[in-house]
Image (cartoon, rainbow, N blue to C red):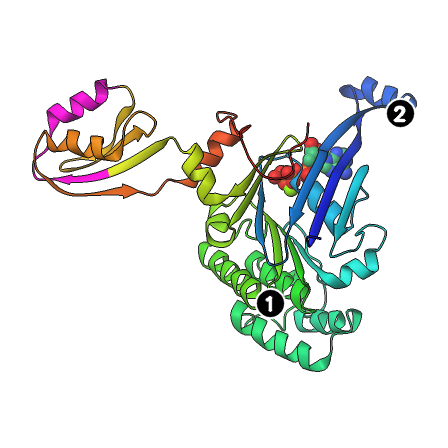
Amino acid sequence: MSMIEVRGLTKSFQQAVKEPGLKGAVKHLFLPRHIEKVAVKPLDLSIEAGETVAYVGPNGAGKSTTLKMLTGILRPSAGSVSVNGLNPYTQRMANAAQIGAVFGQRTQLWWDIPISESFSLLKDIYQIPDALYRKNLDLFIDLLGMNEFIHLSARKLSLGQRMRADLAAALLHNPPILYLDEPTIGLDISVKQKIREFIKQINQEQQTTVMLTTHDLGDIEDLCKRLIIIDHGAIIYDGTLSEVKARFAATRVIFFQVRESMPELYQLLEQTPGLKLEQQSGKEFSVAFDRHEYSASEVVSKVMNYGEVLDFRMEDTQIEHVIKAVYDGHLNLNERRGTGRNG
Ligand SMILES: Nc1ncnc2c1ncn2[C@@H]1O[C@H](COP(=O)(O)OP(=O)(O)OP(=O)(O)O)[C@@H](O)[C@H]1O
Ligand SMILES: [Mg+2]
């Protein structure tokens, strides 16, 4: 049995349909019309203990809805969920003890009391033993740099401070499972880095299972070996990050440094399908090529025909390009392997 087991999990919402204007409002009052919005289509998913999984997809894809069903906040319309052997919705209390959750858009801290007091309330609620509490608190204060604001109330914190406090709050009771819904949204790069390091360390030291949604591809690159892409409520990819890059990034880029500028080469590149000149400035330029049409060595030798090459390097595939193409519907991901494809 996997840590998280999902079979045929579905969520539909009734969405009110109202015609515009006053007339529509009145009509809706007496004759409300609803349509059924399927936010999550029958979903199958297995996540093993200790995995770090990125759950990504465009706005409205169904990411938060999935996480809400996994945490027990929302009741599924159909299907089954088992998290460490529990049903999160019907066994909410028991489930709360084994999970930590951060929904980036809102805090679970008490708004008007100092963070340190919020933490000790959580200690009582989760019945965390003294020694564990002290150990975790000291560690989290240190790793997340919380000393400067732990005496302040949540209301007074900056977004980055609040997110760090929320993350600590979610983990004080050492839950084996951590759900994060956009944990780095709106944060500056240094706070992002801190949070990523922290999650990485918790995962490595305690084998915490981590599932996170994000629009920040840095989060995925830094944290998650496994990537699940969801679109219109259905999983369209489930595999490793490197695989999605290798399989779907048709374009590769080689950066060249040459002794003399190569105008004839630049001209040739402009006219050759499958090859493209990028960021050319003086004696440095990049060539993008379709790896289904050319090999890297073909490209390098082509360039060498036009003059002396001082240096070249392959640039790493930008995951941004790949995911954007997926979002835009430009990639056919149907050949995807692994678990969980439905409908
Ligand atoms: N309580 C609700 N009532 C009606 N419709 C809802 C409700 N919650 C979500 N939806 C709809 O379900 C769909 C999925 O929403 P969800 O919040 O899961 O998307 P998401 O992938 O988290 O998007 P984002 O990246 O913008 O956070 C959307 O079309 C949304 O409008
Ligand atoms: Mg969301």
- Residue at the spot of label 2: 29
Question: Where is 225 relative to 239, above or below?
Answer: below
Dot 2: few (<14), some (14–19), or many (≥20) neighbours within 10 Å? few
- Residue at the spot of label 1: 206
Q: Where is residue 271 in the image (x, y as percent from the top left)?
A: 22, 18
Q: Position of residue 50 (x, y in %)?
A: 60, 59
Q: Position of residue 110 (x, y in %)?
A: 73, 63
Give the residue displayed 81% in from the left and 19% down from the top. Answer: 24
Q: Helix or strand or loop: what does disc 1 sit on?
A: helix
Ligand 2 resides in the quarter of the picture at: top right
- Can residue 321 be seen at all in this image of the molecule? no
On screen, residue 262 versus residue 332, left or right, reads: left
Seen from the viewer's position, the closer of residues 219 and 152 is 219
Give the residue displayed 70% in from the left and 69% down from the top. Answer: 173
- The verdict on residue 268 being magenta is yes
| Mark 2 vs mark 1, CA separation in Å | 53 Å
Q: Given the image, on which type of amino acid does mark 2 rest? A: Leu
Marks 2 and 1, the one that precedes in the sequence: 2
Query: Which residues lie in the magenta part?
Result: 255-272
